[in-house]
Image (cartoon, rainbow, N blue to C red):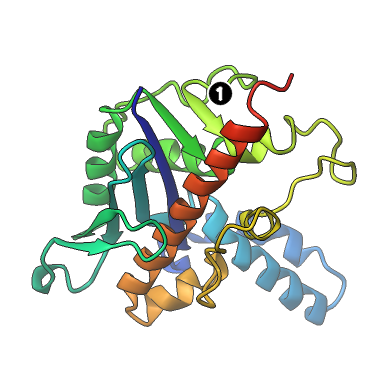
Amino acid sequence: MPRLVFDIETSAVGLENFDEVQQEYLFREAERQPTEEDKARKRAEVSQQFSLWPFTAQVVCIAMINADSGKGQVLYQSDDFDEEALESAESENSGAAVEFAPQVDEVELLTAFWDVAKRYDSIVTFNGRGFDVPFLYLRSALLNVPITRKDWLGYRYQTEPHCDLAEQFTFYNVSGREGAARKFNLDFYCKAFGIPSPKAMGISGMDVSSLLAEGRHRDIAEYCLRDVVATVELHKVWEERLKGIK
C-alpha cells in the first residue's frame, strides 16, 4: 500500500487583502486591551498567528516523499519560476532522489499536490490532522482547486488512511498537556530518538515568512523537505516499536 509522507509551509498574506470590517474582527481582542502598549503587544501576537490560519495565510511549499520508495518531490512557490527548471537533487538525509519543482502560484501548487495525492492509498504526517490537512482543504476550497482526497479527516482513532504521528506519540492525547504522553514538537522527538533534526541548519517554521520576503524560496523548500525526511524516520520508529498499542 503506497504511503505519502508530506509537510506544508505557510506564510501570512498582507493586511491589504482584508477590508476594514475583517481587520477589526481580526484585531478585536487587541483593541480591548487597557493601554496602547498592551494593544500593540496583542496586535503583534495576533499577527504572528496569521500564518496558522488558512483564511489569513497561503501555502508556499509542500514537500512529499513516498515512504516505500524513498522518492519525493517538493512543490514551492517561486518568483523566479520562469528562470528555474525542474531539477533533481539528492536529499542529504535520506539519499533519495527528490525533485524540486517551482510553481508559479498557490493555485498551481495545490493543483499539482492533489494530482499526486490521488495516487496514494494512505498518508503519514506530523500534526497533519490538526494543521496541514484542514489547512489544505480550506485553502483549496477558497481557491476553487479540486480536492482529490476527502477522507483524511475521518475517524480519528485509526491510522488508515491517515497516520498522524503527533497523535500516535501522545496516544491520542491520553494524558493532556502535562502528563507522561504530553505532546512535543517534531524537533524534540527527533532528538530524543536520535534522528537528525530538521532544524539543524538553523531554520524553523518561524522563519518562513521572512525567507519568503527575502526571496529565499529554495531555502524554504529545503527546510520543508528536511521536515518530511525526519517524519519518515520517526514513522519507522513508530512502526517498529509502538504500532499496535491500544
**What residue is rendered at 81% in x and 44% in y?**
182
Left or right of 66: which side holds 53?
A: right
Name above or below for residue 118 compared with residue 169: above
> In which quadrant will I find the N terminus?
top left
Q: Which residue is mark 1?
A: 159
Give the secondary structure at mark 1: loop
> In which quadrant will I find the C terminus?
top right
**What residue is rendered at 30% in x and 54% in y?**
96
Left or right of 110: which side holds 94?
A: right
For this rendering, which residue is in front, 47 or 11?
11
Name above or below for residue 140 compared with residue 97: above
**What residue is rendered at 53% in x and 40% in y?**
236
> Which class describes the residues within 10 Å of circle 1: few (<14), some (14-19), or many (20+)?
some
Name above or below for residue 164 compared with residue 184: above
Q: Position of residue 162 (x, y in %)?
A: 50, 27
For this rendering, which residue is in front, 99 or 21?
99
Q: Position of residue 211 (x, y in %)?
A: 42, 77
The quadrant holding residue 28 is bottom right
The quadrant holding residue 167 is top right
Q: Position of residue 238 (x, y in %)?
A: 61, 36
- Residue 18 shows up from this direction: no
Q: How many numbered discs sit on the rendered protein?
A: 1
**What residue is rendered at 43% in x and 32% in y?**
123
Left or right of 156: which side holds 113?
A: left
- Residue 4 shows up from this direction: yes
Left or right of 6: which side holds 39?
A: right
Q: Amino acid at mark 1?
A: Thr
For this rendering, which residue is in front, 67 or 171?
67
Q: Position of residue 168 (x, y in %)?
A: 66, 33
For this rendering, which residue is in front, 16 or 202?
202
